[in-house]
Amino acid sequence: MISDVLAAESVISTLEKIVIGIQVFGGLLLMIFTFSTIFIIFMAIGITVYSQKNEIIVMKLVGANNWYVRAPYIYQGIFFTLISIVISSAILIPILLTQYESIMYVGLGGLNIANMTWQIILTGLGVEIVFGILLSTLSSYFATRRYINY
């Protein structure tokens, strides 16, 4: 009876270490993807601003304020974010709905967990939209501040 308790404590401590490892790996992966997203947005806006340099100079010469020049780039970033979320969701949601149980069964060694529900999917989609738009807006704003200085 005591050996069962000690064995259970050993299993729990092993599972805690695995969970911490997964959390650290997930956090690092999130940071890598976030920084790569910011870098891609910066480069895309930089190229766009450079290709439209003459139009921006003309807009500034006729009296356009900074927000009038920056707004299209920020809206473009938001638009592309929403399009990419729709495309990725169209690919991932069917996979989640059809293959989630078998992937989790194999990945967790036969541990039975709750099914993927529409509430979980829609909550994840909402969080993805909010953080995607926030990240895109902030990145676009700072990129336009950096590149539009004519």
Image (tube, grey):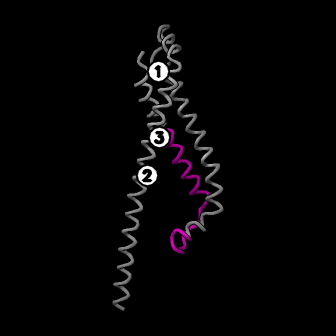
Q: Label 3: which residue?
A: 37
Image spot of residue 6 (x, y percent): 34, 84
For numbered disc 1, what is the local secondary structure?
A: helix
Residue type highlighted by circle 2: Leu
Res 138 quadrant in image: top left
Q: Could you tell whether 119 is left or right of 148 in the image? A: right
Pointer 2 or 3: first along the chain? 2
Q: Label 2: which residue?
A: 29
Residue at left 58%, top 44%? 85
The segment highlighted magenta reads: 106-133
Residue in the foreground of this view, choosing between 125 and 83: 83
Q: Label 1: which residue?
A: 67
For numbered disc 3, what is the local secondary structure?
A: helix
Image spot of residue 82 (x, y percent): 58, 39
101 shown above or below 63: below
Pointer 1 or 3: first along the chain? 3
Question: How many other residues sit within 10 Å of disc 3, few (<14), some (14-19) or many (≥20)?
Answer: some
Is residue 59 rendered magenta in the image?
no
Q: Could you tell whether 3 is left or right of 99 in the image? A: left
